[in-house]
Structures are given as C-alpha cells and as structure tokens.
Amino acid sequence: MYDNPKFLGSGDSCLVVEFSDGIEMAANIALQNLRRALTLRKTVGVREFVPTYRSLSIHHDPIKLPRDKLEDIVRKELFNLKDSSETEKRVLVMPVVYGGEYGPDLRNVAEHTKLDESEVIKRHTSTDCYCYMLGFTPGFSYLGGMDESLATPRLKSPRVLIPAGSVGIAGKQTGAYSIDSPGGWQLIGRTPLRLFDPEDAENPTLIDAGDWIRFSAISEKEYLDIKNDVDSGRYKPEKIIERAQSEGGVA
Amino acid sequence: MSFMVEKAGMLTLVQDLGRWGHQFRGLTVSGPMDQFSLRMGNAMLGNDENDAALEVTLFGLSIVFSEERCVVLSGADLAMKIDGSPAPAWMVHHVKQGSRLAITGVGTVGCRAYLCVSGGVDVPLVMGSRSTFTKGKIGGYKGRALAAGDVVATGEPNPLWRKSAGLVCPVELRPLRGKDEPIYASDGPQVDAFTEKGIATFYGETYTVSENIDRMGYRLDGPVIEHVSGPDIVSDGIVHGSVQVPGDGKPIVLMADRQTTGGYTKIAVVSAWSAAQLAQRLQGDKVRFARVTEKEATELLVKYEASLRKLHETRATYRTR
C-alpha cells in the first residue's frame, strides 16, 4: 500500500485514485472509506464510483466538475480520513447447503485437501470472507480470506452451465455465481439467496464491495424453504453491522 | 404507437445514453457508440437527450409505422428511403401511418446511425436505462438486437412534435469528422508500464482497424507497443476509450459494451469525443493517435456543447417560422 494514494489519469471523464499495485485488504478498506466519504458529499458532476481491488475510479462530467477541482475534493477527504481508524464491518450471512447435488465437487475438495467433507464445511464457515470487488458478471464477488487449507485448483474442464447461487472454490478464492454462467470453480454448495436481480430497481445486487460474507451451513429443507421465501419476495437476508477492530479487522 | 420491424438489418439495437451507476456491481454501461450523434438527433426532435433511439449499423433495416411521427437519422449519413423516396440523414422527416422507412445503403462517412423518433423508443427501463446489453441479455427489446417481426413501442411525443418536420442540422454542427482526424488520447493509468519507445510507437505510427471490432472493443493492427516488463496487472477499472495493450503489443480500444474491470495495462485513454469518431470507422480504416492532456480533451467536449446549444437555438427559431 502506498503512503499516499496516486492520482492517475483515465481520460477526460474519469480519475483513478490508486492505493496499491497489489491485493491488500488495508488498501481496499481505505478506498472503500474514501468511496463512502465521497458518496456522502454528493458532489455535483460526479457520475459514479467504481471500487476495484486496489483503486477507486471516479467517473465525472468534466464540464460540471473539472479534474483539478475533483482532485482537490479527493485530497481533502483523504486528509480527513487519516484520523478515522474506526470503521464498521458489514456482514452478510449467506446460508449454503453443502454437498450432494448442490455441491458436486465437495468430494474433490475433500480429497485434494485430505480433509473429511464435514471438516471442509466447518472450515468454509469458520472465517468471514471480504468482498474486494464485483465483476466478471453482475453481482459476482471477488472474495478473500477463505481458510487457505481449503485451496483447490479449478476443474480441468470448465462446466458449460453453473446455476446461479452455486458456491465454489478456485485456488485460494471462494465465491458464489450470481447468474447462470459457465465456469471452472469447484462447486461445494449452493445458496438460496438471489445475488443479482435486474428487476430490483433499488438494489439489484445483494453484496457490495467492502462487505464481509459469513457462510452458514443449512440443510436441504432449510434451503428449499428459504428459496421459496426468496422467490416470493418474503425473505430478508441477514445483515449484521459490527464495529471493526482498530487494526482494520480480520485479515 | 409503435413500429413493426420488417427487416432487422445488420445490427439494430435500442440505446439511450447508457446504464450508468451500476458499474460497481460489475454491470456494463452499454449505451451509444457515438453519444454525440444520438444527443443531437434527440435535440432536433425536441426529445429528452436521454430518450432511446435505434442504433443502426450499416444498412438493411426496414420498419413500418403504425401512426404518424417525426423521425431523424443522425450519425453516419446512411442512405434512407421513406415510402420509396430518398430521405437525407440529419433532416427531420414526417412519417405517416403505414409509412415504410428503409436504410438502403452507406453514405459518405461513418457506419453507425441513430434513428430517433419523436417521443423516443419505449422499451421497459431496466436498472434505470433502456439500453441493450446483448451479452448480458439485459435491457432494450427483450435484451437482444431487433429481429424481423418485432413490434416496438414509442413514447408520447411533446405537443409541438410536428413543428420540427423539415429541420436540417447545419453541416458545421454535425459531430462526425472524417477518417483523417487524429484520435485524441491522454495518458492512461499504466502509461509507466511502457517503454519510451513503446509510447513513441503508439503515438507515432499508423494503426489499422482490424476485423475484430464490436460494441465491446476495437482491436487495432499495427506496430507492436513495447512494455517495460509485462502486460498483466491486478485488475482495475476500465472506461469508454481505455486502450489496453495485452501481451501481443496490439492496442484494443474499449467501447460501449466494455467490461467494468480488466487486468491488462492501459497505455492511454481515448477522449470521449474521439471514442465516438473511432466507433464510426470500419475494418481497414486508418487510425493515428494524438497525445493530448485531459484538459485539451475536455475542450473538445466544451466545443460540442456549444454546437448542441446552437442546434437547440436553430430549432427554436425554426419552430416560430
């Protein structure tokens, strides 16, 4: 992570504020804090913010908000953020039915890691995972923080169709497919939550960059019940707000 | 009010100014390849500048109107016929109930035109926009390009819509420049990942539009651009006009249907103005890049806004005649 974030050009209508050239949680938390502070300001001429692993892209209308003015505002917010050590930790509980037809590769992961299937499930639900960014498909979250003993290479031959909600492992990464799509991750379970819903005008994606995901094991019956509630719009996902430790939380 | 598609043409898509505000979710913006022509077409009809229109690529489209309306073809000056008679681009035409409008050939410049209708094309809003994102099957007409047999609704026009008929956009206000105009670009976020020689190649040599072009991006052929150590980075944000240079050293300019993030070095970002100019070029056309600052790139937008204001004034005086 850089001592001072870099301002990088990205055309006439976007400023990139880069915090690091690698994947570091401290850098990502810092850019999420900047994003939040700038969002609260509601500056005229700002179109949208796009957080990635290591930078915040600020899309703006250069006629309403010239680049130098935008840079001044960002500098001011970065200065104010220096003092704020305490941040909140937003946790989304993601119920997952592991194994069986929902997680056809749970056995692969167990064999590769030389653990019992039950131990794989226990370890997968034991640490909160941090969402660095969304991408690939709408609502697909790039998560970090999985117990590294579960790391398993991708499938040799990717599947043509993976149902939305499938939870998988690829190397040290874990994540959930947000829409039906092809992919090569080892599928260990499925969540009944709807991660992307284009019909939902307010909040089409459930997870936001900067959120934490807490996987929670459920039975097939619970899966079907929750799925039913999700489909009929009755289910309210469990979101917890915790106060993060001053070190910046669990890394 | 609606129109029926008789022939869909090569590629006809419903586009407004794009699905902004959702890139953080990983959702592509889409929208027009040439925003400047779309906005001017809407201005000529007295539409809202974000009203949806048909983005028409080359020719073949034929539609029949169920009710009278005004229409204008902006952008590329493709050959258009209304009920068999030539109907020039950049001029507002009145179409009657049952009128047949056909795009019959190329024009003198450009390959993408915007067929704007008074009241706009009315498809359901998806996440705040009517733009079609075909890869994601989102927005537009059922998430796809128009096909023969589709019946597409149009919105309620403003009460004075008939008064625009006959209005012509003065040639000097039209945004489309020739193929010789340089493509203005400023330094990209990873300009330091390229050698001085690589940067000199990019701005000094002439590139050619390859066969691999679509709404997502334009791959260019030409001299290899040299990296300092390699093309890969930890993914970061992408904008309309980002110039990625992957391992083969050939530039790719990302366009309307670009992905939101990417993992290749970006040597430059094409100015918003020039991204629209590039989108009007086809396979085999030449491309020369000219290095500008972001401030100079913004001046191009300021000039356009002045032209747009002038067009609004022209329309206002035309109406009172």
Image (tube, rainbow, N blue to C red):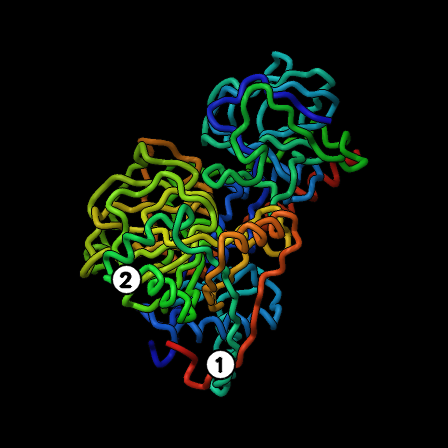
> Which labelled disc corresponds to residue A70?
none
Q: Position of residue B205 (x, y in %)?
A: 24, 45
Q: Using the rendered image of the protein, determine whether residue B173 is visible from the camera's viewpoint.
A: no
**Secondary structure of residue under mark 1:** loop
In this rendering, is residue B44 above or below A52? above
Q: Using the rendered image of the protein, determine whether residue A46 is visible from the camera's viewpoint.
A: yes
Residue B229's image quarter? bottom left
Please report the residue visible at 76 percent of the width from the left and 35 percent of the height from the top. B156
Q: Which residue is mark 1?
A: A244
Q: Are marks 1 and 2 on the same chain?
A: yes
In this rendering, is residue B137 above or below B241? above
Please report the residue visible at 33 percent of the width from the left and 33 percent of the height from the top. B285
Q: Position of residue B99 (x, y in %)?
A: 68, 16
Dot 1 or dot 2: first in sequence order is: 2
Q: Position of residue A176 (x, y in %)?
A: 43, 55
Dots 1, 2 in contact, CB < 8 A: no
**Secondary structure of residue under mark 2:** loop
Q: Position of residue B85 (x, y in %)?
A: 61, 13
Along the line of sight, the residue nearer the viewer: B110 or A90: A90
Q: Chain of mark 2?
A: A
Please report the residue visible at 36 percent of the width from the left and 36 percent of the height from the top. B213
In this rendering, is residue B193 above or below B132? below
| Residue type marked 2 | Ala
Residue A206's image quarter? bottom right
Q: Chain of mark 1?
A: A
Q: Which residue is mark 2?
A: A151
| Residue type marked 1 | Ala
